[in-house]
Structure formats: structure tokens, C-alpha cells
Image (cartoon, rainbow, N blue to C red):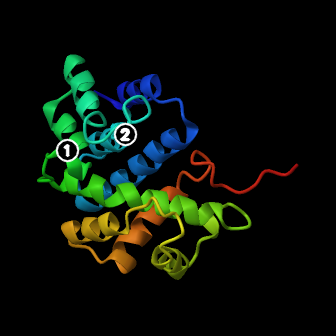
Amino acid sequence: MNRDDAWRLLTEYTQNDHLIKHALAAEAAVRAYARKYGEDEEKWGILGLIHDFDYEQFPAVPNQHTVEGAKIMRARGWPEELIRAMQSHASYSGVSRESRMEKTLFAVDELTGLITAVALVRPTKDIRDITEIKSIKSKFKDKAFAANVSRQDIVEGAEALGVDLWTEHVPLVLEAMKGIAAELGLAGQQPQ
């Protein structure tokens, strides 16, 4: 499987622009961790891209999301390693996170959503304007802000990776997302 296969799978089941951008953000973040750890960047990126591919069509948890995705992936001959990793990002799936790749996907999943929300409330709507981690940290502490983002998952994800949340994890994911700001729709407002 390659990135083109992953993109086709994602876009076959996902038309929602926000979900596609979330997939791209997760891809960028896990790729950054793969580089950091000297792992297979292509494989990790594919996982980030497809981890929620079934969510739009099968949103019910725990009965559908990741369960239906695993069925689809198996029927199409996807490697079991990627199927397992995709399922492991959802705590309710019953699939434990064992590998560094699985732990990384879980660690970046909710954090990419929080960072996206922080960028979108900036006057410029440009993620590249987030220059201080404290602006993300203050929004993290505000439970009403992006209330659907699990702060507990973010904390547990960083702990599982053995990285400091504020000095290592958030900066790495933020920089990865800045690298694809335009693809994420976070490169600022277009002149009218």
C-alpha cells in the first residue's frame, strides 16, 4: 500500500472537508514523529491519513467506527499491521496500543484538532502565526474551548510516548502542521 492507495480509500469514504483536513494533519504529525524516531515515514503517514476514513459513513461508536473500517481494509487486502494500528487509536475499540506507531497516532489525533481550533480563532486564521506554545496551553485549559477535544487523550498520548506535552509534543505537532498550512486551510485569509 502507498499514499495514493490511502488517499483513494480516504476520499472514497470521506467527503467532509474538515475530516479530510484532520486526516492530513494527522498524517503530517505522525510523519514528523517517524522522522524523529527513524521509522518508516511512508507507512506512518499512510496510517495518519486513513485512521478515520470510515468515520463519516460509520460514525457510531463503538459499533461502527473502526470496526467497519477494519472490515473494509481486510476485504481490500490491507496489511494487518495498519488495520490494527487504525483500530487502536480508538480507546473503545478494545485494541491496545502496543507499537510506537500506534501510540503516536493516538497521541497526535486529538492534539491536531485542538491546534486547528486555536489557529481558526486567530484573527489571521494562519497556523503559522502561532509562535508561542502558551497560546495553545491557555486554550487547552479552557474546557469550553473546542469542548469535543479530549484533553485526557492528549495528556495520555504524550505520556505513552514518554515526551513532555508542552516542550516536545505540542511543538513537534504544531511545526508539522505549519508545514502543510495551505492544505489544512490554515494559511490565512485570502484577500477579497
Under mark 1, the amino acid is Ser
Query: Can you say which quadrant of the picture contains the N terminus?
Result: top left
Residue at image location 57% in from the left, 66% down from the top: 118
In which quadrant of the rendered view does residue 189 lie? Answer: bottom right
Q: Disc 2 or 1, which lies upstream in sequence?
A: 2
Specify whether residue 185 is in view: yes
Residue at image location 51% in from the left, 82% down from the top: 134
Percent x, y of residue 159: 22, 72
Name the residue beneath numbered marker 1.
93
Q: Counting other residues with Cα less than 10 Å from the Cα at mark 1, is it few (<14), some (14-19), or many (20 or more)?
A: some
Extreme residue toward the top, this view: 75
Q: From the viewer's perspective, is 158 left or right of 32? A: left
Q: Marks 2/1: CA distance?
A: 13 Å
Name the residue beneath numbered marker 2.
52
Does 87 appear above or below 26? above
Residue at image location 53% in from the left, 29% down from the top: 15
Label 1, secondary structure: give it.
Answer: helix
